Amino acid sequence: MYNTSFIKKILLVATVVLLYSCDKDFNEIGEGLIGDDHFGLEHTEYDVLAYNQEVTPVQSNGLTLNGLGIYDNAVFGTTTANFVSQVALETNAPTIGESPVIESVVLSVPYFSHATGANPDGGNYYALDSIYGDKSGKLKLSVYESGVQMRSSYIDGGSQFAQLYYTDQDADFFGNIIPPGNRLNDATDPSQNDAFFFSNIQQKQDSTVVDANAAVKKYNYTYTAPEMRLKLNKQFFQDKILNAPASKLSSTTVFQEYFRGLYFKVEKSGSNPTNLALLNFFKQGSNAKITIRYKAKTAVTTDDDATTEDKTLVINLSGAAAGLYNDVKDPAYAAAVTNPNKNAGDDRLYLRGGQGSLAVIELFGKTDLISYDDQGNVVNTPNGVSDQLDEIRNNVKYKKWLANEANLVFSIDAAKMTGVWEPKRIYLYDLVNNIPIVDFSTDGSTDGINNKIVYSGIINVDATTKRGTTYKIRLTSHVRNLIKDATVKNVKLGLVVTGDINTITSGKLKNRILIDPANPNDYFSEVPRASIMSPLGTVLFGGNIPSTDANYAKRLQLQVYYTKPN
């Protein structure tokens, strides 16, 4: 009898604990929901003030990806992306040899690509990744010796600072090419310059003879993935490198003062369509480089005086580098981002990478007419807090509502984005402090391809049209913090396109941007680097859409899902 009673008590306690745990887990599970099935949870939608903000010239050195090419976008306009980089000898103080004579000089830059199948002749077939615009596009590509001494840092007042380069400095570099007008990629083949194109053909490497005695010699070739390969002027490198005083090749610092780098300039190639590629000039293990092959007399004293040997000297693109942009904005886009409605919000939000634009997001309305007393009763006195946020806090505190989930769902303006490349992802962050929101930082989820899939920002694509419909961002923890702690400031959020959700570092703006002209402390001075690297843009519906508009249901609102006590 005692044992039975004891067991019943244990079961009762376990049941209570289990029910409590289930209730607690239910309220936490909301943070991990990925789909749109909210198990019957009630939700309320709140106002969001969202408006456009132009991004002024921004830091473009230190990027892991750099654009090269011309991208024509029907919505945003035309972006021309040039590039400049320092160079460095792979080995300082090289032994050049006696009487060197250049055989070839080749500049190689790796592309992003993936194999699509085996080539019966050897190697693979490839498709290029990160090419935007017409796949058959051609460009006039010119590579020059740079006349600008780039540096990684500078000294001011006895202190050392990082040297910054900005997207709007193209004229500074083009105006200082050496010698003026003489490009290094001056081969007669137009595919090397005036009609250059990003080729998906694999590169055939040096061969070795398999059977030298066969009627037709047999070779064994090795192959590499597609890359840019430009033949450069041999006489220039004969004079600049092989005939240079040994002191000029003695160290990286001296060499970079002597040979200041390469400047890549793109222009339209006649009436050909254009495109733009994202390139990793400094990809570890396969960085962009200049390979000089030459012959020099052997160092073996017993050899005949005329005997030569094959030698190779490599110059890497290394050190300071910068992406340089020239934009011609579409007039409608330019008007939207330079004249935002910061009081009522904009009806369309234009997000564009590079030196483009972002959206400023303010959760909840600006209306502040009431507050609540310590009993949860309405007081007709403003308190400096949005009435909607006051209402949520009151419902949670006094009505015992539980906030399970909060989302921002951004609908894409499909009409404006017809035929335009769409970014795969957008990124919401704390604009004021230039840091990720807590939902981003604490999300360790992955689907094997994408990271932070609960926080998301990933484009949702219509199965029929294959076009994007919405982007959804989870900010449950961010909203919960606002609800439970009245001292937490409802900061402005920034929304940008992103080319890499794992990159959260930022680039400095050349001039900080004042958000509210009436408040000199309301500004931001940095932009996420992942947005600077992306050439893409999208148009989203904002919150300021009239109820009579056919797109009213697509307006931006904050969705908060609750469980409410019976």
Image: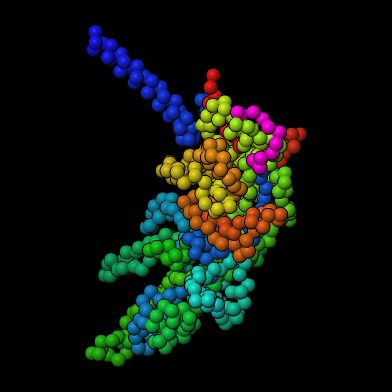
Observer-nearest of 176 and 267: 176
Picture residue at 76% right of the left edge, 34% below the top:
548
Image quadrant in which you'd find residue 470: top right
Image quadrant in which you'd find residue 264: bottom right
Q: Which residues are magenta?
A: 375-385
Q: Quadrant of the C terminus?
A: top right
Q: Quadrant of the N terminus?
A: top left
Image quadrant in which you'd find residue 508: bottom right
Relative to residue 525, is residue 321 depicted above or below?
below
Observer-nearest of 110 and 496: 496
Q: Position of residue 499 (x, y in %)?
A: 52, 53
Is residue 381 inside the magenta stretch? yes
Query: How is this picture coloured?
Result: rainbow
Is residue 531 inside the magenta stretch? no
In the displayed orientation, state which residue is furthest to the front: 374
Can the viewer see residue 441 in this picture? yes
Relative to residue 13, is residue 248 depicted above or below?
below
In the displayed orientation, state which residue is furthest to the bottom: 305
Picture residue at 46% right of the left edge, 74% below the top:
87
> Would residue 107 be found to the left or right of residue 136 on screen?
left
Picture residue at 57% right of the left edge, 26% below the top:
399
Can the viewer see residue 43 in this picture? no
* Magenta stretch: helix, strand or loop mostly: loop
